[in-house]
Image (spheres, helix red, strand yellow):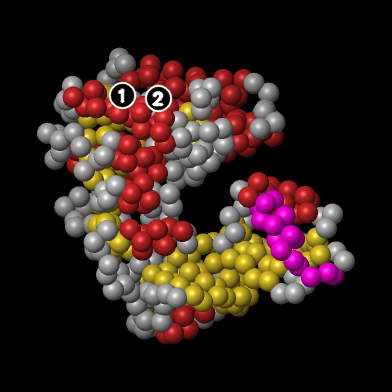
Amino acid sequence: MKVFKFGGASVKDAAGLQNVASILKRFQDEQLVIIVSAMGKNTNALEAVLASHAKQDGKAQELYDAIKESHYDLCRALFDANDEVFSAVNDTFVEGEWVLEEAPSDNYDYMYDQLVSVGELVSSKILAAYLNKASLKTQWLDARDVVATDNTYREGWVIWDKTKANAQRIVPPMLAQGGFVVTQGFIGSTSENFTTTLGREGSDYSASIFSHCLDAESMSIWKDVPGVLNADPRLFEHVIKLDRISYREAIEMTYYGASVIHPKTIKPLQNKNIPLYVKSFIDPDGVGTEISSDNEETYPPIIVVEKNQALLHISTLDYSFVAEHHMARLFGKAADLRLFVNMMQNTAISFTICVPNIPDRLQKFIEDVSDEFKVKMESGLELLTIRHYNEETIANLKKGKMVLFEERIRNTLQMVVRNIPAVERREVDIAGSKAS
């Protein structure tokens, strides 16, 4: 049994769904569990609906109707007018409308999970229906019947023993009937049957959960890139595809913000030595990248750019030393607000942290510590991480930037920088020499 994951870019339109079906025809005699994300940019669109509903600006239903209509347009392009998929899609959108019919909840994260999860539910129903139409026998599975989480909305923590029991009870009998099983990424359920999500871009993690619980032979992520690259091709030229990387290197890359794989994906696979393949849905015959335990390679410089970062410069109001008990309080508050500390630096009387610029959480953090600390914030920054760095690559990356602070440990350098000129594309050969 294998697990495949298809992201939103692969199912964004009718041509995308047809391409996915053509890929899956190659595996029609195999047992596959297929995880699918929301189509295209629909997670972003649903987040906009929720923001509008929370503000009560009168636009939420209009925005939601536009999302519905785009899915109906897709169905009309793929199915006959009387196909039952239309009813299935409509019923799912009704679940989201229940949120919009109620007054906004004080718990924004709870409300988020109940509404935004509609994207995955709808896309999986459309994909399952289309695969059946294409003579690829497929059963639809609600991931919420399998993935059990706690009540941490928008960042649900998996209850592994319960999830494993659910997966082994539900999925093998479905596969035994023949054909594929299609389910959703990103979502789970609490013990009270409320929907949770696993964190933004969490569909990779969902595929890893199913792979681990079902002892999959392998897991494959199908993306719009040829495999794992040593930098984002949208930001850099002359990027290099990595044919093989180790679990350890993949964990390091995702920890520092590499977006090709969700950070929580690797460990459940490593624990059972399940190989992960990153493949291209544009070129399905391509080699892709293998991530496994046996791949201790010599790597080129690997660069991760995290934009929209903020520095918080923190000092005590009475100018006393920043001691351990101060840091304990600050880290506790950051954990409560789910502010991930990417870098930190301290002196005797100040403490600086680099965190993602999430305005509502940062404002809450500053307010909550203002009784004891003065906080100055700098925004509009980038965090550059270079794995397996060399001095020439560092020098090239510093061009046109003001380095606010940097830190080096073995194999890894991090810099918080501010762009001086507005340069969006860096003409740098990230292997070490300037590009021509």
Image coordinates of residue 225 in percent, x first then y, are 31, 56
Residue that appears at 85% across and 64% down? 317
Q: Residue furthest right?
A: 318
Specify whether 291 is left or right of 374. left
* Secondary structure that dominates the magenta span: helix
Which quadrant is the N terminus positioned in?
top left
Secondary structure category for the residue under label 2: helix
Vertical order, 252 against 33 (above or below): below
Tell me if residue 422 can be seen: yes
CB contact under 8 Å: marks 1 and 2: yes
Quarter occupied by the C terminus: bottom left
Residue 25: x and y in percent read 15, 37
Location of residue 80 (image quadrant): top left
- How many labels were placed on the picture? 2
SS for tag 1?
A: helix
Residue 229 position by quadrant: bottom left
Residue 339 in magenta stretch:
no
Q: Which mark is on residue 145?
A: 2
Disc 1 target residue: 170
Please name the amino acid that badge 2 sits on. Answer: Asp
In the image shown, does 166 or 88 lie closer to the viewer?
166
Query: What's the CA distance linking mark 1 and mark 2?
Result: 8 Å
Vertically, is 395 above or below 133? below
The magenta segment is: 319-334
- Which of these two is toward me, 299 or 235? 299
Q: Residue furthest left?
A: 29
Q: Amino acid at mark 1?
A: Ile
Q: Residues within 10 Å of mark 1 (few under 14, many from 20)?
A: some
Residue 239's quadrant in the figure?
A: bottom left
Relative image position of residue 205 (x, y in whole percent): 40, 44
